[in-house]
Image: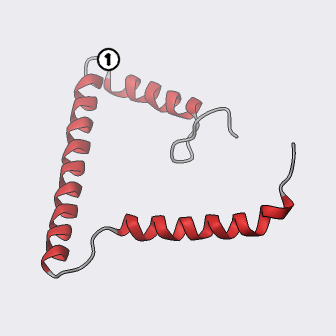
Amino acid sequence: MYAEAIFLFISGTEIVFILFIVLLVFGADKVPEIAKGLGKGMRQLKDATNDIKSEITKSAEKQGLDVDITKDVREEIDKVKEDVDEITGPIKRRF
């Protein structure tokens, strides 16, 4: 396990350094405006993604396709768990 979180292969110190450079380049008065603009852009991207997902789901339902993929995935996970339990049952380790 890693002690520090890694976001897109960038460590915490690198993020702080990038934020410091942004502060130097744009100044303290522009940073909140930049953050607000980035927040709005991310929100618009999320909304657009949700709209696309809902359109795909509606289209699939109109065509009569099964849109609940989580059910299939859950069934496969349960099958794998049962297989693993079957194999490791007699070999349980005690720690």
**Horizontal relation, residue 2 to residue 23: left or right:** right
34 or 79, which lies in front? Answer: 79
Q: How many marks?
A: 1
Q: Amino acid at mark 1?
A: Ala
The relative height of residue 55 versus residue 20 in the rendered view (above or below) is below
Q: Residues within 10 Å of mark 1 (few under 14, many from 20)?
A: few
Question: Which residue extends farthest front?
Answer: 90
Question: Which secondary structure, mark 1?
Answer: loop
Scheme by which the image is coloured: secondary structure
The relative height of residue 3 versus residue 32 in the rendered view (above or below) is below
Identify the residue at horizontal 52%, vertical 71% (top origin).
76
> Can you tell which quarter of the image residue 5 is in?
top right
Question: Which residue extends farthest top?
Answer: 28
> Can you tell which quarter of the image residue 43 is in?
top left
Quarter occupied by the C terminus: top right
Identify the residue at horizontal 78%, vertical 64% (top origin).
88
Q: According to the image, label 1 marks what residue?
A: 28
Whole-percent x, y for residue 39 in the image: 25, 36
Whole-percent x, y for residue 36 in the image: 23, 30
**Horizontal relation, residue 10 to residue 20: left or right:** right
Quarter occupied by the N terminus: top right
The relative height of residue 20 versus residue 52 in the rendered view (above or below) is above
Identify the residue at horizontal 12%, vertical 77% (top origin).
62
24 or 92, which lies in front? Answer: 92
Whole-percent x, y for residue 9 in the image: 57, 47
> Can you tell which quarter of the image residue 81 is in?
bottom right
